[in-house]
Image (cartoon, rainbow, N blue to C red):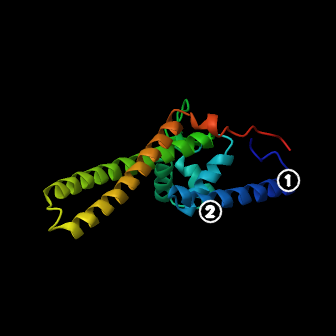
Amino acid sequence: MSLDHLQEEQQATVLRIRKRVIEAIGRNMDLYGVTLSTGHLYGLLFFADKPMTLDDMGREMEMSKTSMSTGVRTLLDLKMVNKVWSKGSRKDLYEVEYDWHQTFTDYFVIKWRKAVESNLQILRKSVDEMNRLIADLDEQADAELLHILKEDKHKVLQAEAYYKWLDRLIDTMEDEEIYKLVPKEEIKEH
């Protein structure tokens, strides 16, 4: 809802409250690898009463269209903002994704799944190589090397177990089973 119909003092009060929330959102967006200014952009869209164009955002934030475009692209990639269509508009319009649970899940899954797969591949390759080395060693002549390889293999297998667990955690987020374990909070008006 637009603030235009409010008295000047009322507008100032609402804007002060919104600014506080936008600042908090901006500061916390570094958890998503997002810059402070892009976090502020998300906060602006969060309180927008309708989808905004890059020009609208640039005017509100006093930033260049290029900066707005970069910020919006980042937010689109993280699925924190959606591009929407509006009849009669030739410009791209954007609105915030209000389901923060889904936003977090999308981010976590996108970032961690890639890391898990990469690390598991490296760990498995390392275990295979250690197994080949161990098989080729003479237990008496190479006792010290054998001991080191077995200890290293144990450490790598511990790391592999962790990444397998993390992979299952990611699965619970993707299929929303996580919400059975940690239910979403109900909204309670104060």
Asked whether 108 or 59 is in front, the reply is 108
Helix or strand or loop: what does disc 1 sit on? helix
Residue pictured at 74% horizontal, 55% vertical: 18
Between discs 2 and 1, the one toward the N terminus: 1
Percent x, y for residue 159?
Answer: 39, 55
Q: Is residue 134 left or right of residue 76?
A: left
Asked whether 164 or 173 is in front, the reply is 164
The amino acid beneath tag 2 is Arg
Residue pictured at 59% horizontal, 44% vertical: 52
* The N terminus lies in quadrant: top right
Mark 2, residue position: 27
CB of mark 2 within 8 Å of CB of mark 1? Answer: no
Mark 1, residue position: 10
Asked whether 140 or 109 is in front, the reply is 140
* The C terminus lies in quadrant: top right
Q: Would residue 42 be seen by someone viewing this image from the given angle?
A: yes
Percent x, y for residue 104?
Answer: 56, 46
Residue pictured at 81% horizontal, 40% vertical: 188
The vertical placement of 26 against 5, above or below, is below
- Looking at this view, name the residue that lies furthest to the top: 87
Percent x, y for residue 85?
Answer: 53, 33
